[in-house]
Image (cartoon, coloured by chain):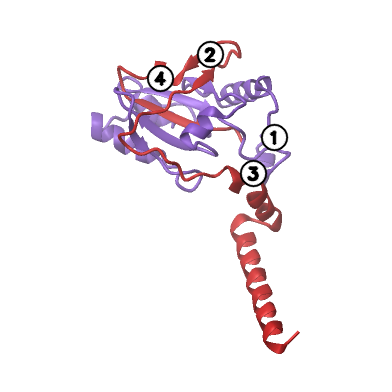
Chain colours: A purple, B red
């Protein structure tokens, strides 16, 4: 998503929303997360969510604008967001693109295709940031 | 127990074992099957929002941990790409 952000940030706005953890240590932890030292328990407080979100942004040098879902999981429930999902909202506040449920149907290239259709192809050659999750 | 029910039960248990083995292979291990059933399935939703519908507004917290904003504040002038996810 970082590459797409770098390509289209002059034409569209971007917002990353942190929702409840998908593979915390106290639930369904993945070996890949242990290997990459991404080990967090499921946050029980908003402060814990803020801390993990900040860890993510700093460790991944993640440049996109960021918001954090509340402990009622309002954003998650409204958008069926967990574990990961993509949307595009148009200028009139309507859903313009609704991606599938991640991880199997989480496809940033579908967002790129929407942006290409709307704005034409754009490719920055100097995208330095490595593509982190989400 | 009659012979019929013994066979039925045996076939059922055999199919369950095959299904569990298949899921374990796909998910990575039997522990992952448990994690998927126990933690993932209850939170997985195919999603009801469709293209053309109003995007729900939600209140979000900024990274500083103190300021809130509404998702709809970020819409209006340009398309908004929204990426939902977590760290793990």
Q: Which residue is mark 1?
A: A39
Q: Are marks 3 and 2 on the same chain?
A: no
State which tag comes first along the sequence, 3 or 1: 3
Q: Residue at x 30, y 34 (%)?
A: B52
Q: Is A112 placed left or right of B43 in the picture?
A: left
Q: Is A74 placed left or right of A10 in the picture?
A: right
Q: Which residue is mark 3?
A: A32
Which is closer to the viewer, label 1 or label 2?
Answer: 2
Q: Chain of mark 4?
A: B
The x, y position of residue B44, in whole percent, is: 54, 44
Q: Could you say which disc has been placed on residue B68 in the image?
A: 2
Quadrant that contains the N terminus of chain B:
bottom right
Which is closer to the viewer, label 4 or label 1?
Answer: 4
**Distance (Cα) linking label 3 and label 2:** 33 Å
Image quadrant where residue A108 sits: top left
Residue A8 at least partly seen: yes
Q: Are marks 3 and 4 in contact (CB under 8 Å)?
A: no
Q: Are marks 1 and 2 on the same chain?
A: no
Q: Residues within 10 Å of mark 3 (few under 14, many from 20)?
A: few
Q: Could you say which disc has been placed on residue B72 in the image?
A: 4
**Distance (Cα) linking label 3 and label 1:** 10 Å
**Distance (Cα) linking label 4 and label 1:** 32 Å
Q: Secondary structure at mark 3?
A: helix
Q: Residues within 10 Å of mark 2 (few under 14, many from 20)?
A: some
Seen from this angle, which residue lies furthest top?
B67
Q: Are marks 3 and 2 in contact (CB under 8 Å)?
A: no
Q: Secondary structure at mark 1?
A: loop
Q: Nearer the viewer, residue A127 or B57?
A: B57
Which is closer to the viewer, label 3 or label 2?
Answer: 2
């Amino acid at each position: 998503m970082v590459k797409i952000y770098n390509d289209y940030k002059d034409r569209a706005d971007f917002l990353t929303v942190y929702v409840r953890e998908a593979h915390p240590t106290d639930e369904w932890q993945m070996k890949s997360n242990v290997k990459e030292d991404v080990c967090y328990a499921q946050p029980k407080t908003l402060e814990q969510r803020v801390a993990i979100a900040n860890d993510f942004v700093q460790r991944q040098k993640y440049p996109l604008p960021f918001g954090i879902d509340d402990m009622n999981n309002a954003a998650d429930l409204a958008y069926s967001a967990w574990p990961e999902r993509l949307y595009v909202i148009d200028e009139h506040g309507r859903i313009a693109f609704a991606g599938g449920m991640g991880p199997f149907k989480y496809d940033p290239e579908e967002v790129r295709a929407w942006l290409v259709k709307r704005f034409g192809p754009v490719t920055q050659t100097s995208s330095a940031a490595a593509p982190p999750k989400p | 127990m009659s012979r019929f029910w013994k066979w039925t039960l045996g076939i059922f248990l055999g199919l369950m074992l095959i299904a569990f083995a298949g899921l374990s292979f796909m998910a990575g291990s039997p522990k992952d099957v448990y994690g998927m059933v126990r933690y993932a399935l209850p939170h997985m939703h195919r999603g009801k929002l469709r293209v053309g519908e109003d995007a729900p507004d939600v209140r979000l917290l900024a990274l500083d941990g103190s300021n809130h904003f509404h998702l709809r504040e970020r819409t209006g002038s340009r398309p908004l790409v929204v990426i939902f996810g977590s760290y793990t």
